[in-house]
Amino acid sequence: MKSGERQRRILNLLSNRDYLDVGYLIETLDSSPATIRRDLVVMEKAGLIRKSRGRIAPMAAPAFDLRNMVQDEEKNAIGKLAASLVSEGDSIIIDSGTTTLAFAGNLTKVNRLSVVTNSIPVAYALNGTSVTTYLCGGTVRD
C-alpha cells in the first residue's frame, strides 16, 4: 500500500474517534512501525493530526483539506450521481463543502451549464471548462 492510501485510511479510521493508538494502526494497516511513524510525521507536519505518547488525535477543527481526504470514495460516488441529474442548459447553485466539490468536479463536461457558487474551490474546479461560473461577488474568468 502506498503512503497516500495509508494516510487516507488512517484519517478514515480517526474520523469517528477521539484518538487512535499507534499499535492499533500498525496491526490494522499491516505495516511496520517505521512506516507508520513516517506517515504520522508527514501528517502532523501537514496539520492533519497531532501525536502524543503513542497516540494520534485529529486536529480540533477539521480543515477543509482533511475533510476532503476523508471518505473520498463516497463523496465521489455522490458527486457522480448528483451530476447525472444535471442537463445541458441548466442553471444551478452549488454551496461550499467537500461533497459539493466532488459534485462540481463531475460537471466539467456539461455544455451550456451555469453555476452560481460561494465556494472558491468549486469555482477553481470549474475554471477552464465550458461551465459558466458565477462566484458571489463577480464572474470567474479563465
Image (cartoon, helix red, strand yellow):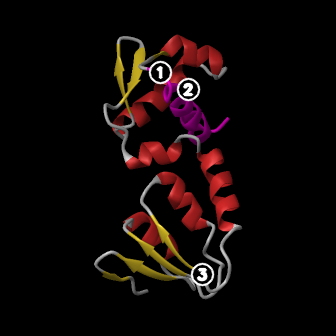
Give the magenta range: 1-17
Name the quadrant containing residue 105: bottom right
User: Which badge, 3 or 2, is on the more N-terminal residue?
Assistant: 2
Query: Which label sits in the foreground, 1 or 3?
Result: 3
Of residues 125 and 104, the one nearer the viewer is 104
The residue at the point 64 percent across, 23 percent down is 29
5 to the left or right of 115: right
Mark 2: which amino acid? Leu
Circle 3 sits on which residue?
90
Mark 3: which amino acid? Asp
Q: Do the residues labelled 1 and 2 touch (CB within 8 Å)?
A: yes
Note whether 9 is above or below 92 in the view shown. above
Measuring from the top left, give residue 63's x and y in whole percent: 36, 44
Mark 1: which amino acid? Arg
Circle 2 sits on which residue?
13
Circle 1 sits on which residue?
17
